Image: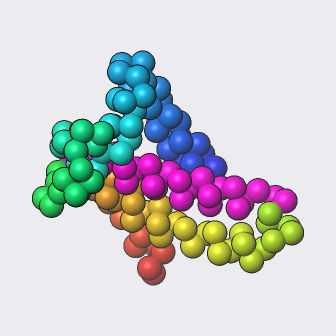
Amino acid sequence: LGWATVLLAFGHGALYMLAWGLEGGNKKVWDEALQVCHHGPRVTDQPARRAFRKRCRGVSNFFGLVAVGSGVLLALASVAWVRRRRYAWFVLAHQLHFAWWFFLALHWPGSLVFSAPALIFFLA
């Protein structure tokens, strides 16, 4: 189930980046992928301080990218070779699930509805 989740999330991001690349080239990919506030100022046209705005609503592609990055690191540490030879790395990397859920919630706040049952089960 964990591998399927990471693969689906990675595929979700990769297909969006492919669509943006076909639509507007590299500049469009960077503008969308590094976008902290959906429909906010274009990242490549603005200073960094203006890209991070308060009261942002909608999907944040940047935080989705960070969430997928933590998920990929977690998945790579779950490979049998790492698990057998570097078990401490495996256990430590699995603490990245906190980063995964945190940045997923920043990426799309609606994800909390779907992750609430798992969070309740984890806290119980």
Q: Quadrant of residue 117?
A: bottom left
Q: Is residue 59 magenta?
A: yes
* Range shown magenta: 58-81
- Residue 95 image-quadrant placement: bottom right
The percent position of residue 67, horizontal first and vertical second, equals 46, 55
Residue plotted at (50% across, 44% down): 9
Compared with 67, 61 (above or below) is: above
Point 46% across, 38% down: residue: 13
Would residue 114 appear left or right of 121 to someone viewing this image? left
Taking depth in this image into account, of 86 and 116 the one nearest to the observer is: 86
**Residue at 19 percent of width and 53 percent of height:** 50
Q: Main secondary structure of the magenta part?
A: helix
Position of residue 1 measured from the top left corner of the image (x, y, whole percent): 61, 52
In the displayed structure, would residue 100 be above or below residue 10? Answer: below
In the figure, is residue 68 to the left or right of 117?
right
Q: Residue sitting at 86 percent across and 69 percent down? A: 85
